[in-house]
Image (cartoon, rainbow, N blue to C red):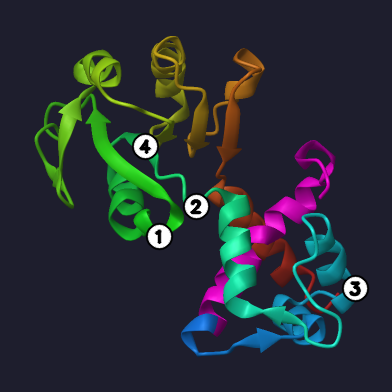
Amino acid sequence: MAKSDSISMSVIRRLPRYYRFLSELEEKNVDKISSTKLAKIMNVTASQVRQDLNCFGGFGQQGYGYSVTYLKEEIKRLLGLNNNYQAILIGAGNLGKAVAMHMNFEKLGIHLTACFENDPQKIGDKINDLSVLSESDLEMYCNSHTVDTAFLCIPRTGVENIIDKLYLLGIKNYWNFSHYDITSKYSDTLVENVHLSDSLMTLCYKMNNLNS
């Protein structure tokens, strides 16, 4: 198996798609699948599928293809979805509520344990089964609970102060919706940035160039 630091990010970013499509195949009671059929679903080549999976050991048998359930479970393991990571959410506005209410975190190996907000009018609100806590309680909460990652659903202007506090509390993994460049300040953090506007502009580009 290849060392994880030698695997390209493009391969890693395809793993969630493999997992999603394999989960759908399993729900349809599909037992096995060839690299050719999996490639068609993924909209890549069969060679790409084999190259991707060979980065992690292969998982297939010549003449048989891939066991859907086995491959799904192996990718689940590679993605760390069995680790039950403990997460907190910062920001209980419209975006934070949408993230908390509509993401199936348990299925993704994440347990959302608390939501924090600095707007007094939102503190005490319920999001699913969680009461929104005050940001002033953040330090006390983190000192008494395991927190593996924080989801930042607040405006860019509000991130710098909260990121300093979170970092000092030992939190170095972030799902970041804020557009604030965390790694430029703390280079030892792991950050997955989510830019909804970038995705929309990419769609606009595709529409703009559809008939060019």
For residue 142, which quarter of the picture? top left
Q: Can you tell which mark lies on residue 36?
A: none
- x and y percentages locating residue 207 in the rendered image: 70, 71
Identify the residue at image location x=57%, y=23%.
Answer: 182
Which residue corresponds to mark 3? 47
- x and y percentages locating residue 92 in the rendered image: 26, 39
- Mark 4, mark 2: which one is toward the viewer? 2
For residue 123, side relative to residue 73 (left or right): left
Q: Secondary structure at mark 3?
A: helix
Disc 1 and disc 2 in contact, CB within 8 angstroms: yes
Circle nearer the N terminus (1, 2):
2
For residue 204, side relative to residue 109 (left or right): right
Circle nearer the N terminus (1, 3):
3
User: Which quarter shows the C terminus?
Assistant: bottom right
Identify the residue at image location x=46%, y=45%.
Answer: 83
Q: Can you tell which mark lies on residue 107?
A: 1
Which residue corresponds to mark 4? 87
Identify the residue at image location x=55%, y=33%.
Answer: 179
Segment tinted magenta in the rendering: 1-25
Q: Looking at the image, which is closer to me, 175 or 93?
A: 175
For the residue carrying disc 2, how many other residues have a C-alpha within 10 Å: few (<14), some (14-19), or many (20+)? some
Secondary structure character of the magenta stretch overall: helix
